[in-house]
Image: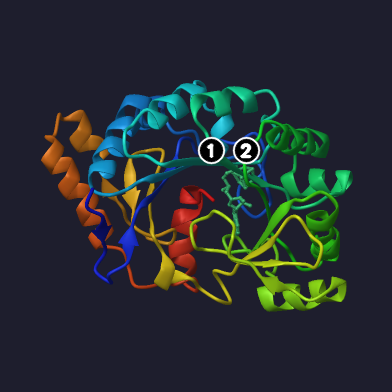
């Protein structure tokens, strides 16, 4: 199967699919307190439409899929979608990003349907603080989800933490210790300035703090998709990853395309415009026309993101999908 490159010779083999823009939490840096405005059901891509995009993208060389949201586990029938995607010949890796709060009840079915890997977002290990950051959530549910994912044999289970100055940056060492004590694979993601909810903490500052526990050895043995730089503390089973879109952008390694829940192909997390693939699908476009649209979206990937443009960020808040 031939791969596909963008205009800057980056190989693109990874599609992130946002299956919903709704969520059961309201994290302060991601959603307004009242949630996102309701999009009429008919605007949302059906599973059959998503599957058609996956099959067509796979013909062009996409072989990794990540399912995200909003919160993917609030979309009804999500297990069926995982099963449908895992049956597509040529798809080698299916992963999901979730807040974990609904995971315990679904994880075995997800694994049975073909899910390989999972990323669980968790910004604090403190119960009261979890409620403040997510505005609605219960830490016990997220921790139960993490335990269930590990028990179900998903490998690796990665924990995504967004450090915020003065909010949860006093917990960096506690999270780093979890790589030693519980074998967690923790990834620190720099806060992107969507709504000025807080200030980000540069990865270099985090690494310096963590080095109080021991030297950080670079680590290359973890499955992933290039955005994180990994390290390990002496005697830790788990790893520490740093995703630094603000201070150390990784655009030159970007291998991804996004599909929004409303059917826009987004060439970059920060793109202000996408390629509408839903309307042509609904009009019965031929396979070759759909391939051309996907190739056009890949061809329009910018060389790098422009994180300083707040207009761009605000327009795209709802397209973030981990
Ligand atoms: N609801 C799922 C979850 O929370 O994992 C999937 C969607 S969520 C938008 C995907 C990831 O994006 C989460 O790890 C979340 O922490 C991260 N995220 C959301 N807004 C962000 C921001 N402003 N800066 C950095 N990461 C952000
Ligand atoms: Fe929901 Fe994930 Fe956004 Fe939090 S980060 S509000 S869990 S979509």
Q: Is residue 122 left or right of residue 293?
A: right
Indicate the position of residue 157 as horizontal and vertical percent values.
65, 45
Label 1, secondary structure: give it: loop
Q: Which mark is residue 154?
A: 2
Indicate the position of residue 10 as horizontal and vertical percent values.
32, 67
Indicate the position of residue 180 as horizontal and vertical percent values.
82, 57
Q: Nearer the viewer, residue 282 or 211?
A: 211
Please report whichever mark, 2 or 1, sits nearer to the chain's N-terminal start. Answer: 1
Q: What's the colour scheme? A: rainbow
Q: Compared to 316, does 262 lie above or below?
A: above
Q: Which mark is residue 293?
A: none
Q: Compared to 129, does 91 lie above or below?
A: above
Q: Is residue 173 left or right of residue 164?
A: right
Indicate the position of residue 4 as horizontal and vertical percent values.
25, 57
Q: Which mark is residue 116?
A: 1
Please give the name of the residue rendered at 41% of the width and 41% of the height, measured from the top-left corner. Answer: 92
Please give the name of the residue rendered at 66% of the width and 41% of the height, measured from the top-left corner. Answer: 99
Q: Quadrant of ligand 2?
A: top right
Q: Does the residue at mark 2 contact the one at mark 1 (Cβ under 8 Å)?
A: yes
Tell me which corner region of the image, top left, top right, bottom left or bottom right, holds residue 209.
bottom right
Q: Is residue 305 visible?
A: no
Q: Is residue 105 visible?
A: yes
Label 2, secondary structure: give it: loop
Q: Nearer the viewer, residue 74 or 241?
A: 241
């Amino acid at each position: 199967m031939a791969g596909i490159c963008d205009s800057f010779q980056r190989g693109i083999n990874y599609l992130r699919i946002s299956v919903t823009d709704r969520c059961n939490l309201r994290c302060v840096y991601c959603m307004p307190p009242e949630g996102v405005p309701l999009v009429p059901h008919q605007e949302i891509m059906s599973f059959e439409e998503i599957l058609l995009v996956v099959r067509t993208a796979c013909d062009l060389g996409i072989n990794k899929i990540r399912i995200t949201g909003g919160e993917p586990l609030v979309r009804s029938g999500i297990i069926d979608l995982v099963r449908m995607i895992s049956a597509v010949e040529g798809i080698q890796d299916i992963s999901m990003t979730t807040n974990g709060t609904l995971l315990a009840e679904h994880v075995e079915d997800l694994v049975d349907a073909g899910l390989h890997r999972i990323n669980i977002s968790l910004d604090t290990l403190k119960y009261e603080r979890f409620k403040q950051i997510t505005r609605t959530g219960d830490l016990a549910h997220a921790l139960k989800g993490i335990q269930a994912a590990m028990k179900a044999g998903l490998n690796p289970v990665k924990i995504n933490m967004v450090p915020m100055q003065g909010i949860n940056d006093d917990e960096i060492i506690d999270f780093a210790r979890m790589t030693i004590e519980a074998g967690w694979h923790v990834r620190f993601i720099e806060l992107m300035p969507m709504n000025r909810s807080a200030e980000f903490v540069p990865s270099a500052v985090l690494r310096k703090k963590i080095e109080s526990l021991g030297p950080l050895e670079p680590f290359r043995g973890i499955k992933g998709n290039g955005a994180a730089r990994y390290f390990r503390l002496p005697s830790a089973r788990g790893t520490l990853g740093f995703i630094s879109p603000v201070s150390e952008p990784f655009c030159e390694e970007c291998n991804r395309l996004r599909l929004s829940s409303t059917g826009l192909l987004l060439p970059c997390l920060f793109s202000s415009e996408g390629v509408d693939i839903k309307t042509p699908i609904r009009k019965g476009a031929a396979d070759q026309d759909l391939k051309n649209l996907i190739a056009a979206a890949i061809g329009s990937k910018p060389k790098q993101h422009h994180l300083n443009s707040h207009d761009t960020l605000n327009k795209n808040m709802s397209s973030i999908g981990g």
